[in-house]
Amino acid sequence: MSIRQLPEDLINRIAAGEVVERPASAVKELVENSIDAGATRIVVTTAGGGKTLIRIEDDGCGMDQTDLLLSVERHATSKLGADELDDIRTLGFRGEALASIGSVAELSIASRCAEAESGLRLDLRYGARSGPVPVAMNCGTIVEVKNLFARTPARLKFLKTDRAEAAAITDVVKRLAMANPGVHFVLNGSDRTAQSWPAVTGARALEARLSQLVGDDFAQNAVPLALSRHGVVVAGLAGLPTYTRANSLSQFYFVNGRSVRDKVLVGAVRAAYADYTFRDRFPVVALYVAVDPAEVDVNVHPTKAELRFRDAGGVRGAVIRAIGEALTAAGFKASTSVAE
Ligand code: ADP
Ligand code: MG
């Protein structure tokens, strides 16, 4: 047995296995790039549950030729300085998504920055690069991903039906829209349905966005959260104890603008409602927590859906208190006081 260095395209395909599990993960990475680029309008179009086509169009800052060429290089990112892993303020930072996607699909990136007179298009097909060539386009970026995993049959086999993959894409886009009320999202689905969530701004932007996405019903049966305590800011809407579901699918958690799965937050919500709801019922909650980026590690998992708080106890306490105060203000009384 001898040790050898793996070739670049194999390394990319291995990374793709972690970052791009399914079409919805590609959509998440690409839309996050658009948000990081300062887009105000993002149009997501898919076909075949994202297996045949994913197209993301944004009006963000775009890329010049140098950046466009670098964007598909592995570990090339405009977002992370040499010593900044403790202070991440963008959604991306690993510089892996485009290189990974382009290693397992037909990727094309067309981009035009404000200073350029026309756009440039670069292709990366199953690891083979071509271009850039000039294209006529508005300022911003259009990324197309065709035939994802077509040459990775082992992965393709594990994808679900087009309908199930499309549902996962809708879920991802909705969560991104919930986290970014100031951005107009359009989602053109495989089944030719189109959904549009116009940007909302102002003091009640979050509630308006949640009405759009979770339903007017939720907004009418929930109390707003507003608490700032020891560097933890809690916002969002907490459903009334009378407005519950049989599962936790209607609980949405965000930390510093990122949709996350996190045991600390789930546990805090459960504790906050312990005296209000029945054991097997789940309140509908959209919880937005903001902490100093240095207080949270988002680099736990390649998809960045998990994180670790430095002071989990402080975050838990703040969430329990925020929900408790909001429910009390709405006239709900807990039978016993909840331990933080
Ligand atoms: P990361 O987001 O972790 O930096 P990506 O592979 O997703 O890595 O993207 C690489 C780089 O390409 C980004 O850092 C950014 O500079 C550029 N980029 C990607 N998508 C866009 C976009 N939609 N608009 C502008 N720049 C983009
Ligand atoms: Mg990215």
Image (cartoon, rainbow, N blue to C red):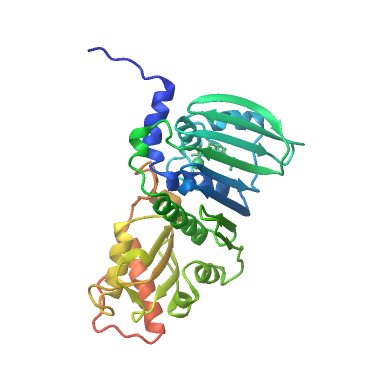
Above or below — where is 227 with respect to 122?
below
Q: Which picture quadrant has residue 122?
A: top right
Residue 332 x/y as whole percent: 35, 85
Single out the residue that lies furthest toward the right: 117
Name the one closer to the observer, 29 or 228: 29
Question: Is residue 90 toward the left or the right of residue 14 in the image?
Answer: right
Tell me which image quadrant ligand 1 sits in. Answer: top right
| Residue at image coords 52%, 39% | 145
Name the one closer to the observer, 161 or 312: 161
Q: Which picture quadrant has residue 327?
A: bottom left
Single out the residue that lies furthest toward the bottom: 331
| Residue at image coords 46%, 49% | 49
Residue 113 x/y as whole percent: 69, 39
Locate the N terminus and report the quarter of the image it occupies: top left
Question: Is residue 300 toward the left or the right of residue 76 in the image?
Answer: left
Above or below — where is 202 with respect to 258?
below
Name the one closer to the observer, 279 or 124: 124
Question: Is residue 161 toward the left or the right of residue 44 in the image?
Answer: left
Locate the C terminus and report the quarter of the image it occupies: bottom left
Residue 249 x/y as whole percent: 35, 64
